[in-house]
Image (spheres, rainbow, N blue to C red):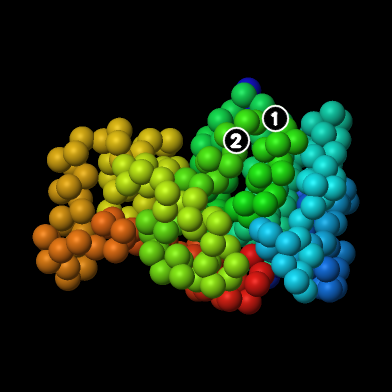
Amino acid sequence: MKLPFRFTVCGLDELAIHSKARVSHVLSILDPEWPVPGVFGHFGAHRKLELRFHDVIDETPGSIAPRAGDVQQVLAFGAALNRDPVTDAHLLVHCHAGISRSSASMALLIAQAMPDRSGDAIFADILRIRPQIWPNLRIVEMGDHALGRNGDLVAAAHRIYNLQIGKRPDLVGEFKSGGRGREVEAALALPDAAWVLVADVPCGVFGNFLRPLKTLKDLPQDDIQRARYDHRRRQGHHPGERHILDRAPLQAGTVGRHGPRNAARKHVRGGHR
């Protein structure tokens, strides 16, 4: 089954570059106090749903968390798109950074349109165009329940966190300090052999032998150990030294204006993702 729409995930500072991309549908997710982006006046005719909540995964004093009603509005928007498809439909979902709220919401919309597609495959689709995603777990949990996925999307999101921590172990501290400890703990609870979810995106040293939707347990152990040995040697580690989480750190690719490293650091600390 083919996805009935093209899709884009982005942040606020990237909206202008998509104004001429023939976007037919927009899901706009903003902080409650944020003004409506004026750039939408430069888009062509499109249907838009605007939602407002903070990028938090639990009820937090001073913040408005995403609610079940927000998820229902996302799914109603998707149902309308699927029920009355537009020729060459192009769905754009944005939040402040295009990392967390938008990626979680896009996963729900793809899952709704393609109910037989696995959670891992859905997130792999999003990773291909947005390698720095870290989906908001609260949105994924509520959407998984609403769609009757029996935890499939939630488990896939955990593997995304695990993948991103594998590339950047410093995210553990950053997300914990930002009130996202549940996501980090879910990632670290996974077996060591399951820490890489692979999509057609740069995956550092393992990129030469990983293929879509496989994990390290699917690869020959000699290849894994050789890759870790070579990578640690290039990074100046002694081959026998235990690295953080006993995992070879992957090199993050550069995406967009800031790249995953700067974008994640900027928006985790600032509360916008």
Q: What residue is drawn where x is 86% and y is 52%?
A: 48
**Residue holding disc 2:** 151
Front residue of 76 and 39: 76
Q: Is residue 217 visible?
A: yes
What amino acid does circle 1 point to?
Gly
SS label for mark 1 = loop
Number of on-image labels: 2
Front residue of 95 and 257: 95
Residue 77 lies, with reference to residue 165, above or below; the image says above
Say which quadrant the C terminus sits in.
bottom right
Q: What residue is drawn where x is 85% and y is 48%?
A: 69
SS label for mark 2 = loop
Q: Quadrant of residue 166?
A: bottom left
Q: What residue is drawn where x is 82% and y is 62%?
A: 52
**Residue holding disc 1:** 148
- Relative side of 184 to 55, left or right: left
Residue 182 lies, with reference to residue 5, above or below; the image says below
Say which quadrant the N terminus sits in.
top right
What amino acid does circle 2 point to?
Gly
Q: Is residue 15 visible?
A: no
**Residue 228, horizontal then vertical, whole percent:** 20, 53
Cα distance, mark 2 to mark 1? 8 Å
Neighbor class of circle 1 (other Cα within 10 Å; few <14, some 14-19, many 20+) is few
- Relative side of 215 to 133, left or right: left
**Residue 206, horizontal then vertical, whole percent:** 29, 49
**Residue 100, horizontal then vertical, whole percent:** 63, 58
